[in-house]
Amino acid sequence: MSAFLTIANPSEGIYKEKASRFLAYAWPVSSEEEVKELLTGLRKDHHKARHVCFAYRLGADKSNFKYSDDGEPHNSAGFPILGQIKSFDLTNILVVVVRYFGGTKLGLGGLTAAYKDAAKDALDHADIIEEIEHETISITIDYARLSELMNFIRQHNIKITEQDLSGECKVVISVPKNDLDVIKARLEKISGYSLK
């Protein structure tokens, strides 16, 4: 099974040190576009904050990741946030820590610990779940064969992610990656469709 761990819902955490507040937010995400939207919204919500540092990791293979120190000293913020994501073995996740400066410098070690502890607090409050990697299949089918396809989808508990039944019928389904070849082979028995 190509399974991975992620979080079910957004969660929050906080860390305070010498009057500085570090507000942590964790979100389940599935694309870089989602990450950008969430960061834009958070920067608007916290426009008075000194730093909005983050890390994310995407994909079941965990190979797509990025982190940002947002003006903090090199590797003192984003890298420890990413370290917590790795420590919890999570993917398809964005963790952001917003810093409100309290007037006292914390030093490199203090900053690193603060960002790490804030991220950890958000993840400690998260509902961690196991998910299975899915692939989407786009099916175009004649209207006359649509009910046969829908019966197949129901029988196999397949999730429909998109459908357009006006004119030429298009249905997009999401199937576990490990079942992809089996599902495709069974779909071949239904004539009058094309797969993408």
Image (cartoon, rainbow, N blue to C red):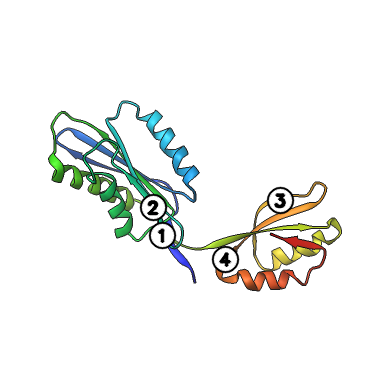
Q: Which residue is mark 4?
A: 176
* Dot 4 alpha-carbon crowd within 10 angstroms: few under 14, some 14 to 19, many 20 or more: some
* Dot 2 alpha-carbon crowd within 10 angstroms: few under 14, some 14 to 19, many 20 or more: some
Residue 145 drawn above or below residue 162: below
Q: Which mark is residue 74?
A: none
Count the numbered circles shown.
Answer: 4
Relative placement, left or right, of 164 versus 68 is right
Element type where label 3 sits in the image: strand
Which amino acid, by three-letter code, is at mark 4?
Pro
Q: Earlier in the sequence, mark 1 or mark 3?
A: 1
Q: Which residue is mark 2?
A: 65
Between 138 and 20, the residue placed more toward the observer is: 138
Q: For the point 33% across and 55% down, which residue is it?
A: 85
* CB within 8 Å, label 4 to label 1: no
- Quarter-wise, where is residue 23 in the image? top left
Q: Which mark is residue 62?
A: 1
Most extreme residue toward the top is 48
The location of residue 142, given as percent across then percent down, is 83, 57
